[in-house]
Amino acid sequence: MRLAGQAGAGNDERVMPKSKAKTEVSIHKPVTVQDLAEILGLSRATVGFVLSGQAEKLRIAPATAKRVLDAAAEYHYVPNPHARSLRTRRTGMIGVIVPSLDLDWAEALLRGMDKVFDDTAYVPFLARHFFNAERNRKEVLSALQRRDEGLIAFPLAGCEELYRSFSESGIPLVLLAEEMPGLNDISSVVWDSETAAEAAVRHLVETGRRRIAFFGMDYPGLGTLHRFKAYCRVLRECALELRESWIARPPVPLPVGEISRVLKRWFKDRGDAPDAIFALNDAIALTVMEELEEMGLSIPGDVALIGIQDLMLSSRRAVGLSTVAEPVEAMGEEAARLTLELISGKTKAPARRVISSAGVIVRRSTVGRES
């Protein structure tokens, strides 16, 4: 298809020689800024300024701007973000690395981020590490290669040097939801989960439970360690037995069948078994609940159960898991806001934001005893 260009009347146009004011436009090849410039008989700079929204600022005649935009629509011009990022060194992408997309934790996180990013030109680029160090390394390096303008990451143990190296690149890095020892020189957004864990264990005590077990994970994250610390502290303050055999902290990710094996050991002797279990998070608690019911134990009659997180499934009437709501959406929102502040220079790294929330949500898994 061939269209002869016509020079506009505005004094801001650089008119191309008529011999170059024509071009072939192929339906099989994307139209470029240069193509539009030749079609319209304008300079490439003028067309580029109009398409980038700078026409008014640079005093390009409205009639010229309209011609450019009309031609762009007619020929289905699509901007090339990769080419633009090479010129401007900006991609508009913020990398987000989470453990997985299981359940709805990551969904709540992104809802919070969207509240901030939707009002900007930035978009999140989601990836997962599945608690695998090599995969995590690949995703972090990919964010660097894509030239993401910021990175928000749920930190993985054993990758401390990777995070330090990334932060030295000059790209803002925000660690989210968990803290790792030795990384206090990197910005973070965390939840005061120790206070939340204390509230959860005290709730079990207040409902009359005296033999309280802990089901967690062997993970060096400070949030994980603080929850276990709160569990131990409440039991000591309440003069309750802190029995080593009622503490389960298997490695991450949890081995298949590990929860079942632990519970069978704990409840082998029903007369000397826990009457309550505090789980590190709802994901563990929900599996514990399922296994207990398959073993023929009633909840909360034989054993009460509480977690931390408040996943969507936990609130289902058929499930009814008592828990402490983790402010995931608020953390996502704060992480997005902090990342933008670091990009703009409004805030200097390292910055640490702590979100407090410790209200127990009481459901059927802890309230009362069956007669």
Image (cartoon, grey):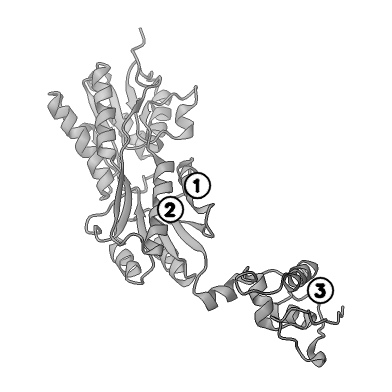
Would residue 364 be seen by someone viewing this image from the given angle? yes
Image marks 3 and 1: residues in contact by CB distance under 8 Å = no
> Is residue 243 among what the camera can see?
no
Using the numbered discs, state the Cα–Cα distance from disc 2 to disc 3 in whole angstroms.
40 Å
Quadrant location of residue 236?
top left
The image position of residue 364, as x and y in percent, is: 40, 19
Q: Are marks 1 and 2 in contact (CB under 8 Å)?
A: yes
Mark 3 closeness class: few <14, some 14–19, many ≥20 residues within 10 Å? few
Cα separation between marks 3 and 1: 39 Å
Q: Nearer the viewer, residue 18 or 177?
A: 18
Quadrant of the frame with the N terminus: bottom right
The C terminus sits in image quarter: top left
Residue 6 location in percent, x, y? Answer: 83, 81
Q: Mark 2 sits on what residue?
A: 336
- Residue positioned 39% across, 35% down in the render: 282
Residue under circle 1? Answer: 115
The image shows residue 354, relative to residue 300, as above or below, that is: below
Q: Earlier along the polypeptide chain: callout 1 or callout 2?
A: 1
Q: Secondary structure at mark 1?
A: helix
Q: Amino acid at mark 1?
A: Lys
Q: Amino acid at mark 2?
A: Ala
Disc 2 residue crowd, few under 14, some 14–19, many 20+, Cα 10 Å: many
Q: Nearer the viewer, residue 173 or 46?
A: 46
Q: Percent from the top left, x then y, of residue 222?
A: 25, 48
The answer to whether mark 2 and mark 3 are in CB contact below 8 A is no
Residue drawn at point x = 82 percent, y = 82 percent: 24
Q: Which residue is mark 3?
A: 27
Mark 3: which secondary structure? Answer: loop
